[in-house]
Image (spheres, rainbow, N blue to C red):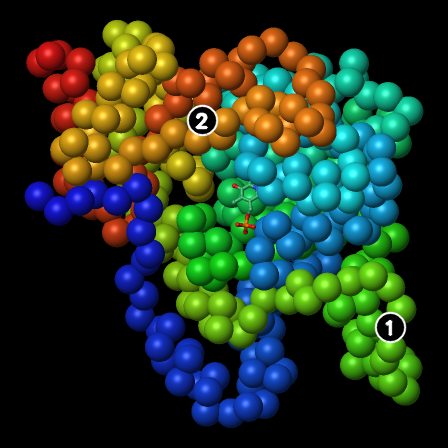
């Protein structure tokens, strides 16, 4: 049997046609034809936000760190259970990351621990929507309003999911979404910055254009453009945009396939959860546009045995997020608030193959092997 990959690229139909078009006319590249088509689609999803297509969510987070003017010693509150990019963007400007424990049921930041972590140096709170599970945005908004902090959404894996009818990434002052090849809608490499705070829209344009007022120039507001701010080349390149546009056009189909897969995983493995052999993703996430299908075993030892068992059967299952507060850089730069749910979940979590090239039959095969693991030892 062929190897079942953890993730895969979607076999796509229109990408080569998009490329042929792009290379038929220099003007299309120069005028960012596919970036603009992508933005048209994305503007429908995030009508309240100013949008910037970036080379990565990492780049979008770095723009946010520049926009809020992070200074040495500023504290940024974030979950410990997240990807390094969340912390790096701010720490590289000298910020102290204040890592907060997760709620073990949602795997999102435990919002009840945030207020005790706030000091006069706190500048922002980052909500990361784990696996696309919405954070309690109403609670986070209230805390940030009360303490005058910026609310930043790391919605890197949140594309396609909502919190109370509002798209993830569009509710904080800032949001970052990833279109990396490891995510469910992909530009191969790419990202999106969302700005939902009027105050920052103009400056964001300058930072995005290498610290120049090129945007004002393009709108005819100034006779030439010049260096006015810090900045970098954060833009997405047109090759990536040509691929992303195809993915956005197919997103309904991509989400439909993934929802079927997650429902199948859930219904097939439900019995094992009822027998307390493992824990599944929260029921209310099944059928939404989640980024991954994970299971939580009863011990690290069992997680490792199942992971190795599946790998021996040619099925790639992975775990992730070494708690940031326990990493070399985390220990050196940050501090931690909470109990030990982050370590505990990190030790017991296993992520199963989940992508559009996976078939229902393959999901059933994977779940049958998980049954074998428990009952035919
Ligand atoms: C993938 C990811 C990022 C980084 O996204 P890139 O587009 O690869 O830079 C940031 N935060 C989280 C939570 C992620 O999963």
**Can you tell me whether the CB of the residue at mark 1 lies under 8 Å from the nearest atom of ligand 1?**
no
Question: Is residue 63 visible in this depiction of the protein?
Answer: yes
**What is the C-alpha distance between the residues marked 1 and 2?**
49 Å
Q: Quadrant of the C terminus?
A: top left
**x%, y% of residue 255?**
39, 48
Above or below for 113 versus 81: above
> CB of mark 1 within 8 Å of CB of mark 2?
no
Within the image, what quadrant is residue 201 found in? Answer: bottom right
**x%, y% of residue 142?**
79, 26
Task: Identify the secondary structure beneath mark 1.
Answer: loop
Above or below for 192 versus 309: below
Within the image, what quadrant is residue 233 found in? Answer: bottom right
Q: Quadrant of the N terminus?
A: top left
Q: Residue at x 28, y 10 (%)?
A: 277
Q: Which residue is mark 2?
A: 284
Would you call the spot at circle 2 few (<14 residues within 10 Å), some (14-19), or many (20 or more)?
few
Q: Residue at x 56, y 11 (%)?
A: 340
Q: Which residue is mark 1?
A: 227
Question: Is residue 164 visible in this depiction of the protein?
Answer: no
Front: mark 1 or 2: 1
Task: Identify the secondary structure beneath mark 2.
Answer: helix
Q: Residue at x 66, y 41 (%)?
A: 88
Per the rendering, the mark at residue 285 is none
Above or below for 68 versus 329: below
Left or right: where does residue 86 sit relative to residue 140?
A: left
**Can you tell me whether the CB of the residue at mark 2 lies under 8 Å from the nearest atom of ligand 1?**
no
**x%, y% of residue 375?**
13, 12
Left or right: where does residue 261 sit relative to residue 166?
A: left
- Chain-order first, disc 1 or disc 2: 1
């Amino acid at each position: 049997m062929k190897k079942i990959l953890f993730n895969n690229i979607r076999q796509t139909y229109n990408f080569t046609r998009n490329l042929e078009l792009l290379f038929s006319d220099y003007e299309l590249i120069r005028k960012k034809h596919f970036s603009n088509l992508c933005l048209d689609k994305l503007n429908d999803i995030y009508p309240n936000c100013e949008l910037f297509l970036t080379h990565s969510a990492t780049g979008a987070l770095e723009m946010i760190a520049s926009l809020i003017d992070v200074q040495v010693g500023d504290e940024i509150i974030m979950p410990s259970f997240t990807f390094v990019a969340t912390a790096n963007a701010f720490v590289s400007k000298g910020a102290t990351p204040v890592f907060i424990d997760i709620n073990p049921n949602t795997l999102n930041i435990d919002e009840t621990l945030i207020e005790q972590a706030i000091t006069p140096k706190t500048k922002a709170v980052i909500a990361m929507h784990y696996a696309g599970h919405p954070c309690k945005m109403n609670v986070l908004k209230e805390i940030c309003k009360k303490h005058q902090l910026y609310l930043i959404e790391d919605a890197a894996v949140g594309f396609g999911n909502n919190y109370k009818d509002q798209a993830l990434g569009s509710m904080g002052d800032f949001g970052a979404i990833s279109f990396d090849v490891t995510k469910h809608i992909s530009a191969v490499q790419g990202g999106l910055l969302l700005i939902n705070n009027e105050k920052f829209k103009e400056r964001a344009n300058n930072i995005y254009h290498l610290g120049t007022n090129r945007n004002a120039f393009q709108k005819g507001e100034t006779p030439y453009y010049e260096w006015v701010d810090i900045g970098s080349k954060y833009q997405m390149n047109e090759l990536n945009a040509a691929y992303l546009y195809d993915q956005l056009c197919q997103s309904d189909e991509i989400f439909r396939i993934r929802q079927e897969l997650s429902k199948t995983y859930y219904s097939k493995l439900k019995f094992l959860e009822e027998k307390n052999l493992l824990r599944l993703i929260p029921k209310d996430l099944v059928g939404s546009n989640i980024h991954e299908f994970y299971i939580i075993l009863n011990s690290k030892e069992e997680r490792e045995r199942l992971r190795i068992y599946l790998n021996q059967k040619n099925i790639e299952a992975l775990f992730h997020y070494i708690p940031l507060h326990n990493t070399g850089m985390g220990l050196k730069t940050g501090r931690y608030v909470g109990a030990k749910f982050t370590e505990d979940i990190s030790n017991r979590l296993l992520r199963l193959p989940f992508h559009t090239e996976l078939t229902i039959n393959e999901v059933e095969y994977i779940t049958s092997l998980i049954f074998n693991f428990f009952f035919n030892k």
